[in-house]
Image: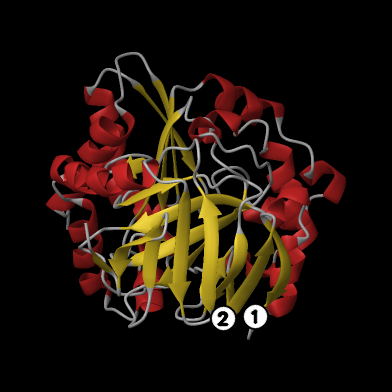
Amino acid sequence: MADPRDSQLAELLVDTCVGVQPGWQVLVAGSPPGRPLLEEIVRVIAERDAYALLRLTFDDSTIASRTWVRSAPLDRVGVPAPIDQHALATCDALISVVSPENTRDASDVPAERTAAIQAAYRPALERMFNHELAWVGCQYPTPALAQDAGMSTREFADFLYAACLRDWDAERVRMQRYADRFDAADEVRIVGEGTDLRLSLAGREMKVDAGGANMPGGEFFGCPVEDSAEGTIAFTEFPAVYLGHELSGIRLRFESGKVVDASADANEAYLLETLGSDEGARRLGELGIGCNPGITRYMRNTLFDEKIDGTVHLALGNGLPDLGGTNVSRIHWDIVKDLRLPGTRIELDGVPVQRDGEWLI
């Protein structure tokens, strides 16, 4: 039975997040479980007098089928398909709907193959990183995502739509007030149990996500100065999930912007392997502050978890060039820390602006 919220979400993605114009060529990527939303997106794009170019896979891989990445010769995996390069270079927008049947499906892809496909398509995706290409990613409520969140499928669907279908104009105004304070500061300090980390934002600006490249939105984010991170941070409240791998108890120590010591309570070998992906993997590409009041619990789902109201997330790897970031890496791994616990705080130039997850400004 059709869910009327799918049409609302499709209009939000097409009009607010991407802003499709007549004549645009819009790549629409997804997999069969997300068909109800994909159909609505295609319909809305058609009504906007634009082309909907549907790319359907069986594993939510926007770039290349995971079955192909597992099976093709490694040398071939490391070379992008010319037709894909052309599509990414000439399309006007990209809308990706993630609807997994198994959220750990990528966990058996060898790291060298993951690294090869990421490196191969890194130049073709530069338009996304620079926000020259209008794009948005979202999820569709599948049983697999609901299971990870510890919810029934119906409960998770209600949660997803509530987090996405918000008054984003009002949310933008609210978050911009906080972002402005960060823009006026030179140094950010994050303090909590096992954590005392300082970052510089000098000369950088924060961007508010209120109906942009990720849906749900509900954060503001920017790029720390690449050599500025000093101190330690412990991501001990939530497991971190990346490319189908789950790690717990991640602890990082930074000197001059670079991770010089790293450990994890579980899956430490994968953490160290990922940090060794390339030269930029040990530096920070993003600092983000979660602000979505509709997201209050950990879901094992980074798209939602990084927006939890009262959290902070740091991304290892590739920076955001349109926000002044210069770090280059094939990875971009957002790891979330809960700041709602007693004794945690965020300081700007030595002045507390958030304590125990509550804003003081």
> In the figure, is residue 130 to the left or right of 111?
left
In which quadrant is the C terminus drawn?
bottom left
Mark 2 residue type: Ser
Q: Point out residue 138 in the picture as x, y percentages from the top left corner.
A: 36, 50
**Residue 29 image offset from top left, x and y in percent:** 46, 41
Of the residues under marks 1 and 2, which one precedes in the sequence?
2
Question: What amino acid does circle 1 point to?
Answer: Ala
Picture quarter containing residue 263?
bottom right
Image position of 119 with respect to 141: above or below: above
At a point 55% along the width and 28% down the height, the residue shown is 127
Quarter occupied by residue 355: bottom left
- The one nearer the camera, 1 or 240, is 240
Callout 1: few (<14), some (14-19), or many (20+) C-alpha neighbours within 10 Å?
A: many
Q: Is residue 49 above or below residue 326?
A: above
Give the residue at mark 2: 248
Question: Which quadrant of the structure image shows residue 122?
Answer: top right
Tell which residue pokes out farthest to the bottom in this image.
Answer: 265
Q: How many marks?
A: 2
